[in-house]
Image (cartoon, rainbow, N blue to C red):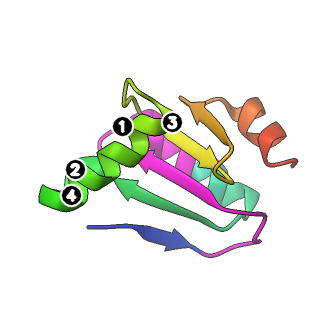
């Protein structure tokens, strides 16, 4: 599995780094789905090799601890963890 895109209202670039087995990652995806926004996500535990290396490098720029979920909004704001109100505020919803 690689980068997946969820269609919705385009309010900028939203990238979610997640684990397929993480409850908080699932809650974050559900929140984004309920808000109806367009976003991309990748399950870091389901990729391997060069793709995983590249995505980890991308993630480390925003979250050196590489914890999940990590959301990057418009390449300018990073939110680590399931923080519903902070996510809504950052998306201006």
Eye-nearest disc, 3 or 1: 3
Residue 17 is situated, as x and y percent measured from the top left of the image, at 43, 47
**Gap in Å between the C-alphas at discs 1 and 4?**
15 Å
Residue 20 visible? The answer is no
Mark before the other along the chain sequence, 1 or 4: 1
* Residue bearing the label numbered 3: 62
Q: Locate residue 26 relative to residue 82 in the image: left or right.
A: left
* Residue bearing the label numbered 2: 53
* Stretch of the chain drawn in magenta: 7-29
Task: Establish if 45 lies above or below 7.
Answer: above
Residue 82 is situated, as x and y percent measured from the top left of the image, at 57, 31
**Gap in Å between the C-alphas at discs 3 and 2?**
15 Å
Q: Which label belongs to residue 22?
A: 1
Residue 5 is situated, as x and y percent measured from the top left of the image, at 51, 72
Q: Secondary structure at mark 3?
A: helix
Mark before the other along the chain sequence, 3 or 4: 4
Q: Locate residue 56 relative to residue 11 in the image: left or right.
A: left
**Gap in Å between the C-alphas at discs 2 and 4?**
9 Å
Q: Would you say residue 33 sits in the magenta stretch?
A: no
Q: Quadrant of residue 23?
A: top left
* Residue bearing the label numbered 4: 47
**Gap in Å between the C-alphas at discs 2 and 1?**
20 Å
Q: Secondary structure at mark 2?
A: helix
**Gap in Å between the C-alphas at discs 3 and 4?**
19 Å
Q: Would you say residue 18 sits in the magenta stretch?
A: yes
Q: Residue at x 58, y 51 (%)?
A: 30
Mark before the other along the chain sequence, 2 or 4: 4
Q: Residue at x 22, y 50 (%)?
A: 53
Mark before the other along the chain sequence, 3 or 1: 1
**Gap in Å between the C-alphas at discs 3 and 1?**
19 Å
**Alpha-carbon neighbours of circle 3 within 10 Å: few (<14), some, or many (≥20)?**
some
């Amino acid at each position: 599995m690689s980068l997946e895109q969820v269609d919705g209202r385009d309010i900028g670039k939203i990238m979610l780094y997640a684990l397929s087995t993480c409850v908080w990652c699932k809650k974050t995806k559900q929140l984004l789905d309920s808000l109806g926004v367009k976003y991309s996500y990748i399950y870091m535990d389901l990729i391997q090799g060069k793709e995983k290396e590249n995505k980890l490098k991308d993630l480390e720029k925003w979250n050196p601890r590489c914890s999940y979920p990590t959301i990057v909004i418009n390449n300018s704001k990073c939110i680590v963890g399931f923080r519903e109100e902070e996510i809504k505020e950052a998306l201006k919803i």
